[in-house]
């Protein structure tokens, strides 16, 4: 009788069964186990985390909040929304908090997409856009890039009456490419007002102040705009999982209906309030990142390794045999991110580390490359 029935997992929708699992940066402990290395000797430059550790003010806020762990968090996050509203100069009714900004991206797809709808995004854009789109049974429309960057004219041309959401990452991960505010705003102005534009600004804080996004000031003009940001990158709180979206109050209301009531935990809320107040920490993170990017660029130039010019806290480099080079780096205790799953099989994405970490990475890369050239030379004889 059981032969007549499909296994339960086979009855999941086709679009769920077709999702390619997310491949993240390898955890330090996993690399230590697999390669028999000392945890302390490993450096991780794989997930665009802040190499400085969190702000001491955030750590102090967490220590205080620990005594309240028996209670559910404030599902409406009054203190954090008040602080964010002041920081961003918007009404709190425009803010939706997420369990990471990843959650905000998911909430947008939950609120707006169903089977039969399209979501438009760029080739080489953040991998969560296709994942979140597929999970709703909607169709992802991937638009060809222009030199690894979003081609906004082509993206505009890909919008049809089926399109419900367009995703833009600025700066983009994994390419590090960046579009000017003027280019982004004229794109948004050209999009029909019944199509949601998700503008993902996870790396905005790493831009120089003069280049930072003014998109939140555009919100009164575009009721279809969702701007998302995160505490995971420049604020150094990736493990706590907290990000936010800012948008039209009616859109925020919908997103809040589909979100889990307690999606942001109390430690994250407390830490985020403190982190927002520590503007020196963010400024120093930006400075360290700018210098680290220059250090990596100079080192890559010296090795004659090509890379994509980056505006984030990471750099996409073309090493040729990325899988082979990655393995050699892992053996030397350095974790970076292969991006073959993005359709970039010859590239590695390397997060900007502390100066000493960048130095170690460049030395290891130099070795890995000269080994391979030596190996190739032998193979050709
Ligand atoms: C890291 C990242 C995010 C989300 O990170 P969260 O930790 O979920 O806030 C969103 N978009 C891009 C482009 C990213 O690189």
Image: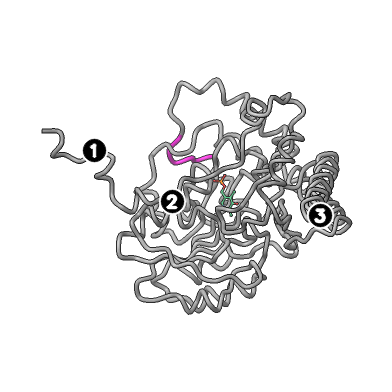
Q: Residue at x 52, y 54 (%)?
A: 127
Labels 2 & 3 near each other (Cβ < 8 A): no
Residue 250: tell me if it is visible.
Answer: yes
Residue 381 shows which numbered tag?
3
**Of the residues tagged 2 and 1, which is closer to the observer?**
1
Asked whether mark 1 and ligand 1 are closer than 8 Å, the reply comes as: no
Bounds of the magenta span? Answer: 74-79
Disc number for residue 335:
none
Q: Position of residue 21 (x, y in %)?
A: 46, 45
How packed mark 1 is, by other alpha carbons closer than 10 Å (few <14, some 14-19, many 20 or more), is few
Q: Would residue 291 appear left or right of 241 to someone viewing this image? A: right
- Quadrant containing the N terminus is top left
Tell me the CA gap for discs 2 and 3.
53 Å
Near-viewer residue (119 or 65): 119
Q: Is residue 277 visible?
A: no
Q: Nearer the viewer, mark 2 or mark 3?
A: 3
Determine which of the numbered discs, if any, sits on residue 106 in the image: 2
Determine if the magenta segment contains residue 330: no
Check if residue 76 falls in the magenta segment: yes
Q: Is residue 18 left or right of residue 197?
A: left
Instruction: Name the residue nearer the viewer: 349 or 219.
Output: 349
Instruction: Find disc 1 in the rendering and name its residue.
Output: 7
Crowd tier of the residue under label 3, counting other residues whose Cα lies within 10 Å: few below 14, some 14–19, many 20 or above: few
Q: Is residue 224 above or below residue 39?
A: below
Q: Position of residue 248 (x, y in %)?
A: 45, 62
- Choose mark 1 or mark 3, whichever is in front: 3
Task: Tell me the element at label 2.
Answer: helix
Would you place residue 99 above or below residue 144 in this image? above
Label 2 vs label 1: CA separation? 28 Å
Residue at left 85%, top 52%? 295
250 displayed left or right of 239? left
């Amino acid at each position: 009788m059981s032969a007549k029935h499909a296994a339960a997992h086979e009855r999941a929708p086709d679009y769920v069964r077709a999702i390619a699992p997310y491949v993240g940066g390898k955890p330090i402990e996993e690399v230590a186990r697999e390669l028999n290395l000392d945890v302390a000797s490993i450096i991780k430059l794989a997930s665009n985390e802040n190499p400085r550790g969190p702000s001491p003010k955030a750590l102090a806020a967490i220590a205080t909040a620990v005594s309240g762990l028996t209670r559910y968090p404030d599902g409406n996050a009054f203190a954090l929304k008040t602080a964010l509203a002041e920081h961003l100069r918007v009404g709190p009714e425009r803010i939706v908090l997420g369990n990471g900004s990843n959650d905000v991206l998911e909430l947008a797809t939950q609120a707006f997409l169903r089977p039969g709808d399209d979501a438009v995004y760029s080739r080489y854009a953040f991998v969560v856009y296709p994942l979140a789109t597929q999970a709703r049974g909607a169709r992802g429309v991937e638009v060809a890039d222009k030199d690894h960057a979003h081609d906004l004219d082509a993206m505009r041309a890909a919008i049809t009456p089926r399109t419900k959401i367009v995703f833009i990452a600025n700066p983009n991960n994994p390419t590090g490419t960046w579009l000017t505010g003027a280019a982004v705003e004229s794109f948004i102005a050209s999009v029909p007002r019944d199509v949601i534009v998700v503008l993902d600004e996870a790396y905005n804080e790493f831009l120089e102040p003069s280049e930072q996004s003014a998109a939140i000031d555009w919100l009164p003009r575009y009721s279809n705009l969702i701007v998302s940001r995160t505490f995971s990158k420049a604020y150094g709180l990736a493990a706590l999982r907290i990000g936010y979206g800012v948008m039209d109050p009616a859109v925020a209301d919908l997103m809040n209906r589909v979100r889990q009531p307690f999606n942001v935990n109390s430690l994250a809320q407390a830490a985020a309030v403190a982190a927002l107040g520590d503007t020196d920490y963010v400024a120093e993170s930006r400075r360290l990142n700018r210098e680290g990017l220059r250090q990596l660029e100079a080192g890559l130039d010296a090795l004659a390794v090509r890379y994509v010019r980056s505006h984030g806290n990471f750099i996409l480099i073309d090493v040729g045999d990325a899988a082979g080079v990655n393995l050699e780096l892992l053996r030397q205790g350095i974790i970076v991110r292969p991006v073959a799953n993005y359709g970039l099989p010859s590239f590695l994405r390397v997060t900007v580390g502390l100066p000493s970490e960048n130095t170690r990475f460049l030395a290891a890369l130099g070795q890995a490359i000269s080994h391979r050239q030596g190996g190739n030379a032998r193979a050709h004889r």
